[in-house]
Amino acid sequence: MSNPQDKRRALTPEALSMMDTIARTGSFAAAAREMGRVPSALTYSVRQLEDALDVLLFDRSSRQAVLTAAGEELLHEGRRLLQELDAVANRVRRIATGWESELTLAVDDAVARRALFDLMEAFYAQKTDSGGPPPTRLKLRIEVLAGTWEALLHGQADLSIGVPAQTSSSAVYTEPAGEMEFWFCVAPHHPLAALPEPLSSAQIAEHRIVAVADSARRIAPITVGLLPGQDVLTVPSLATKLEAMLRGLGCGSLPTPMVRRHVEAGRLVRKTTYEGRRSGVLHYGWRNTGHAPGKALAWWLERLGSETTRRALLEQHEGLLL
């Protein structure tokens, strides 16, 4: 049996990255191609790792790269450790230069893309002390509902825009971004289009609703507008929800700026319901690292401090292909 020193020496970032690549690609051959190695060398490295840990990481009875329970645990913890190593490197670079090496933005699907890309364009147009653009790499994640909060809470994002509710956490700061109104709409040929208003819950429950799946995986997802016993078509984004509603596949509520032009053109019919006016306040949030924000995060926070910027992020949907 290997001693603790052997185990620690075996658990290198390279070994953990190798495990991640094999699991992600699904086979030793595919992982070897991606890593620029021959399959036999990869197999040998895995056997060395197994010998050092005194466990089997892959099921040898399968032709594919199927992880054992021990392999699954190593993969899960290894990915977490690699993220921690990246976080350490980011913190060291930020302290040294003031600029983060990477800034991850988790943005709710309801945030207007045009305004978001205007901000990213302005960020890259900055001139640093060296005369060049910011050295910070931006990483954009599109989330739905509780997914923006989860990304912040679990360290997967540095800044979230469109957090659905201001949740208390010492690890995160939040500020209100503004109110977003939602219109309940149906296609002109949908049965609900001809009914008198306001629509009752019983009338709506008889028809399929189109819902966007919450992207949260570790915390409780948020469900909005779904009535007991109602048929539901679940889609991955607001853009696909809009397409489904335009085709009459179901009813549902969407941000007012996203559907206004379709209502005005007669492609959708706005209906008032028993709920009355529907709206919600979205927030933006950032992680509390215990240090002053790096230059990249500080730039985004300064821009988000502008009411004009916040309003654009919630309203500038018109004219943009989603």
Image: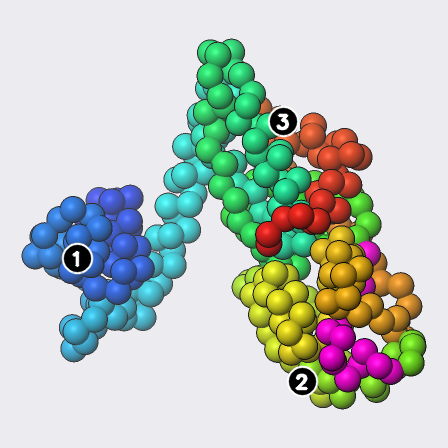
Q: Which mark is residue 313?
A: none
Return the residue at label 3.
299
Q: Amino acid at mark 2?
A: Asp
Q: Dots 2 and 3: beta carbons under 8 Å?
A: no
Callout 3 crowding tier (Cα within 10 Å): few <14, some 14–19, many ≥20: some
Q: Amino acid at mark 1?
A: Val
Residue at image point 74% right, 80% down:
190
For this view, does 194 lie left or right of residue 144? right
The residue located at (53%, 16%) in the rendering is 127
266 on left or right of 22: right
- Disc 1 and disc 3: Cα gap in Å? 44 Å
Give the residue drawn at x 63%, y 48%: 320
Q: Is residue 30 left or right of residue 275?
A: left
**Residue highlighted by disc 2:** 231
Report the residue marked by disc 1: 46
Which is more foreground, mark 1 or mark 3? 3
For discs 2 and 3, the disc positioned in front in the rendered view: 2
Going from N to C along the chain, the mark reached first, 1 or 3, is: 1
Q: Is residue 193 magenta?
A: yes
Mark 2 / mark 3, whichever is N-terminal: 2
**Part of the protein shown in magenta:** 181-195
Q: Residue 298: where, in percent of width, then height?
A: 63, 27
Mark toward the start of the polypeptide (2 vs 1) = 1
Viewer-nearest residue: 244 or 148: 244
Residue 79 lies in the magenta-colored region = no
Q: Quadrant of the N terminus?
A: bottom left
Mark 2: secondary structure: loop
- Alpha carbon of mark 2 to alpha carbon of mark 1: how far? 48 Å
